[in-house]
Image (tube, rainbow, N blue to C red):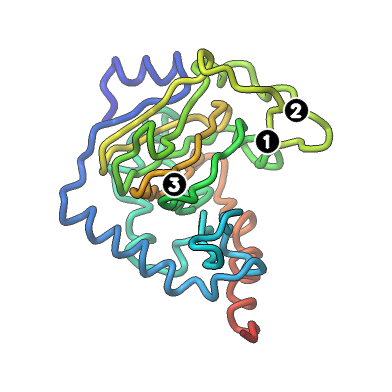
Amino acid sequence: MLTSDQLSYYHENGFVVLDSEFDLSELERLRLASDELLDKSGQVHPDNPRLQIEPETLNGDALVVRKIEPIIDVVQALEDLVYDERMTSPASQILGEEVILFEDKLNYKPPLVGSPYPLHQDFAYWQAYTDQLVSVTLLLDDATEENGCLRFVPGSHRDGLMAREDDHPRIIQFEVDPSTSVSAPGAAGSLVVFSCYTAHHSYPNRTENGRRAILYTYNPKSDGDTYSLYKGRHTQKCRDWVENFKG
């Protein structure tokens, strides 16, 4: 559970980093699950709808996976984690009631070619749904300033959606002043919890250490279960692509 100070920090800043409650053996099992996810998600191919590919290749030709979503239908260990109380409790406490899954993904931020992510607010992607959404990020590896940890604009969650250019409605189009965003590093096993309105971004990873992270976004149970509506069709599209792919 969040302490009163942690809860106050979240409400003031729109995010909070929590120390790990996962032991080394649990983290290792989840790292293996992230490898299994890569193996079972289909061919690493730009058209694979479950994968997002890094714009840079490795050693000149090898495609590298940036992100996979959805994930819980592929690896059982990742489905089992969804309602682990260590994941749901922070969101439940912030939202004031029991929560259910809205979105699931795994970011790899791979070594050497991990690309930056522009400043954005997640709710810009989700405007057809409730805005009572809290993301809980489990760091599988140490996230540092050097390997591109998340960065947040403190307090940006309080003013709704920021202005965005018409040609890219999800990306906030202005140069990020380092003085307006702060890094949120954390050791492996830490949780980074943030609001769907909190503007965030990340710098590239040019180190030899990746920073894998599992992200589950939760909504209040009272707002209904929209996972099958929001992710169901895409999940089926992912499965169909693997079934029909002719490599």
Alpha carbon separation for disc pair 1 and 2: 9 Å
Q: In this view, does 138 lie above or below 104?
A: above
Q: How crowded is mark 1: few (under 14 residues within 10 Å), some or many (20 or more)?
A: some
Residue 51 horizontal side relative to residue 137, left or right: right
Viewport quadrant of the C terminus: bottom right
- Residue wearing tag 2: 164
Q: Are the residues at dot 1 and dot 2 in contact (C-beta closer than 8 Å)? A: yes
Q: Is residue 175 above or below residue 224?
A: above
Label 2's element?
Answer: loop
User: In the current view of this chain or complex, which residue is farthest to the front?
Assistant: 60
Viewport quadrant of the N terminus: top left
User: In the current view of this chain or complex, which residue is farthest to the right?
Assistant: 166
Q: In this view, does 126 lie above or below 179?
A: below
Mark 2 or 3, nearer chain start: 2
- Residue wearing tag 1: 124
Q: Residue at x 50, y 35 (%)?
A: 203
Q: Residue at x 53, y 36 (%)?
A: 133
Residue 51 horizontal side relative to residue 170, left or right: left
Label 3's element?
Answer: strand
Q: Tell me the mark number nearer the camera, choosing from 1 and 2.
A: 2
Instruction: Locate residue 98: give its quadrant.
Output: top left
Q: What residue type is labelled 3?
A: Leu
The numbered dot on residue 215 is: 3
